[in-house]
Amino acid sequence: MAERDAVVVGAGPNGLAAAIVLARAGWSVEVFEAGETVGGGARSAELTLPGFLHDVCSAIYPLTVGTPFIPSLSLERYGLRWIHPPFPLAHPFDDGTAAVLARGFAETGESFGEPVDARAWERLFRPFSDRWMELSPDLLGPLGLPSHPFRMAHFGLVGLRGAAGLAKSRFRGFRARALFAGLAAHSFLPIEQIPTAAFGLMLGVTGHAVGWPQPEGGAQRIPDALAALLRDEGGTVHTGRLIKSLAELPRARVYLFDLTPAQLLEIEGIRWPEGYRRRLRRYRYGPGVFKLDWALSEPIPWRAEACRQAGTVHLGGPIEHVAASERAAWEGRDPTRPFTLVGQATLFDPTRAPAGKHTAWAYCHVPHGSTADFTELVENRIERFAPGFRDVVLARHTLNTAQLEAYNPNLIGGDINGGAATLAQLFTRPVARLVPYSTPDPRVYICSSSTPPSGGVHGMCGYYAATAALKSNQGDHP
Ligand SMILES: Cc1cc2nc3c(=O)[nH]c(=O)nc-3n(C[C@H](O)[C@H](O)[C@H](O)COP(=O)(O)OP(=O)(O)OC[C@H]3O[C@@H](n4cnc5c(N)ncnc54)[C@H](O)[C@@H]3O)c2cc1C
C-alpha cells in the first residue's frame, strides 16, 4: 500500500511546481530537498558581508512572469512582489553608448542610432510580443499539436536558424546586432547554430511583452511563496534530505524527480531497462558558468547612462566577440573575453543592502567543468565599461563550476540549464518519448529542467510532469 500519492525529490522551482499541481488535484504530496532551504536555483544568501543579500543563482525572471503557470498561482498572496527596472537590459560599447532592450519599441530603436535597424527590430519582434501569452504555452512545452499553429509556424520560420545569420541579415549596425547576439547567447550554444535565433527572439519578446522583473527582497521570495502555497494545499516539505535511494522515501504511487540524468542514474531502486539508462548516459550537458557577487559602496559607475537604469547588463561587445566567447565555451576552451551578464538588484530594491550600499551579481559563460578563476577577466571587463568599478568593491564572492555543483547537485559541470539546448534535445529531453516526463518505470517521472521546456525559473517542466503523472494515474486514484 502506498503511504503517499506522490513524493517529489528536489524543491527547485520545478519540483515545487509539480508538487503544487498534484496537491491541488487532491493528492497527498511530500517533497524531499537536499539543501537546508527550498529553491534550488532561486535562493538568496548573505554571501559577502552582513546585510548584503545576494541571489546565489538566478536573479532575473522574464520566464517566471512570461509563462502561464506561476502567474496563475497569485503568489502576491504570499508576499511576492515584482519590481520592473526602467530597462530590462542594456548592452554597452567602447564608445560609451549602449543598446537598450526597453519595454517600448521606440526607446529600444533609438538606442541603435540607426533608424533602419529600429524599424527592422520592431518588424522582427512585434508580431510575437503582441501575442506572447498565446504563443508561450506552445513554445515552452513538449512537442505536440500547437494551439496556435500559424503563429508557431511563423516563429519557427524565423527562429529555426542561427542567431548570427539572422542578426546580420536583419540589422545593419553593430548595436542591434550585438543586442540580439547577447540575447541568443542565453542558449549557451555557438550563436551560428540552430536554434539560437529562437532564443534571441524569445528573450527579446519577453522584454517587450512582460519585462524582466526581479522579486522584491531577492530570489528566495519565489520558492518561499511556492512552498507556502504548497503547505496551504496540504503538501509537506522536508529539507536537509539528500536522497540516494527510493528506499529512503515513503512508499508512493509516483515519484517525481527534480534532478538531471547524471543524478538520476545514481538513484538506487529505479527499475529502468539498460537501453533507457544508456540513452540517459548519452544526454549532453552544456557549458558552465563562473558566478560572482559583490558588495559595493556605490552603484557600478557605468559610462553609458542607460546601464544605470537596466536590471541586467550584457558585457559582450560586438557580435563577433559574443560569437567567439560562446564558441570557445562550447568547445571547451577558456574564452578570453567571456560573455558576462551583470545584475544590479539594489538599484531598484534597496531592501537588499544596508542603506546607501549596493550589490552586484554576475556570471560568465565558461567551458563545462572549468575550475579556472575568471574574477580578473570579468572585473577587467566591467572596468572597461565602468571605470572605477574596483574602487567601489567592498567584498566579493565567487563560485566556479565545481563549487556550483557542490552547492546544487543539479548544476552538473556548472550547466545552469539542466542540459544542452541543442535542437535534438530541446523539445524531447532527456530521452525522446511520447511523454518525455514519463520513464519506463511507471512509478518514476522526471520534472527538472532536463525536460521541456528546459532551463529558467518558470515551473513549466514541473507543471507538465505532474500533469502527465495525473493523467496516467487517473483511474487508480481513490
Ligand atoms: C548562476 C545561475 C544563474 C541563473 N540565472 C537565471 C536567471 O536569471 N533567470 C532564470 O530564469 N533562470 C536562471 N538560472 C537557471 C535556473 O536557476 C534553473 O533553470 C532553475 O532553477 C531550474 O529549476 P529546477 O527546479 O529544474 O532545478 P533546481 O532549481 O536546480 O532545483 C533542483 C533541486 O533539487 C535538489 N536536489 C538535487 N539532488 C537532490 C537529491 N538527490 N535529493 C534531494 N534533493 C536534491 C537541489 O538541492 C535543488 O534544490 C540560473 C542558474 C544559475 C546557476
Image (cartoon, helix red, strand yellow):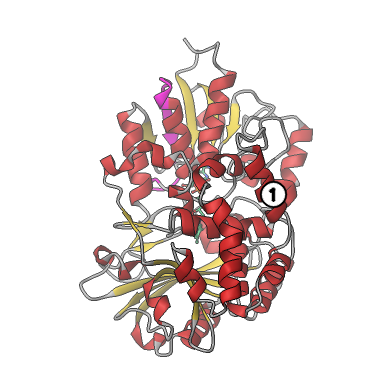
Q: Position of residue 367 (x, y in %)?
A: 66, 67
Q: Mark yes or no: residue 405 visible.
A: no
Residue at 50%, 53% (x, y): give it: 408
Furthest-left residue in this view? 355
Q: Is residue 274 above or below residue 287?
A: above
Q: Secondary structure at mark 1?
A: helix
How crowded pointer 1 is (Cα within 10 Å; few <14, some 14-19, many 20+) is rated as some
Range covered by the magenta-colored residues = 23-38
- Give the number of marks: 1
Q: Is residue 214 above or below residue 328?
A: above
Q: Residue 35: say if magenta.
A: yes
Q: Is residue 170 above or below residue 57?
A: below
Q: Position of residue 333 (x, y in %)?
A: 71, 73
Q: Residue 120: say if magenta.
A: no
Residue at 52%, 30% (x, y): give it: 466
Q: Position of residue 94 (x, y in %)?
A: 54, 88
Q: Is residue 216 left or right of residue 282?
A: left
The residue wearing badge 1 is 156
Picture quadrant of residue 119: bottom right
Q: Which of 107/58 is in front?
A: 107
Q: Which of 58/34 is in front?
A: 58
Q: Name the chief secondary structure element in magenta.
A: loop
Q: Is residue 321 left or right of residue 67?
A: right
Picture quadrant of residue 472: top right
Q: Which of 188/379 is in front?
A: 188
Q: Which of 11/167 is in front?
A: 167
Q: Amino acid at mark 1?
A: Gly
Q: Is residue 89 left or right of residue 461?
A: left
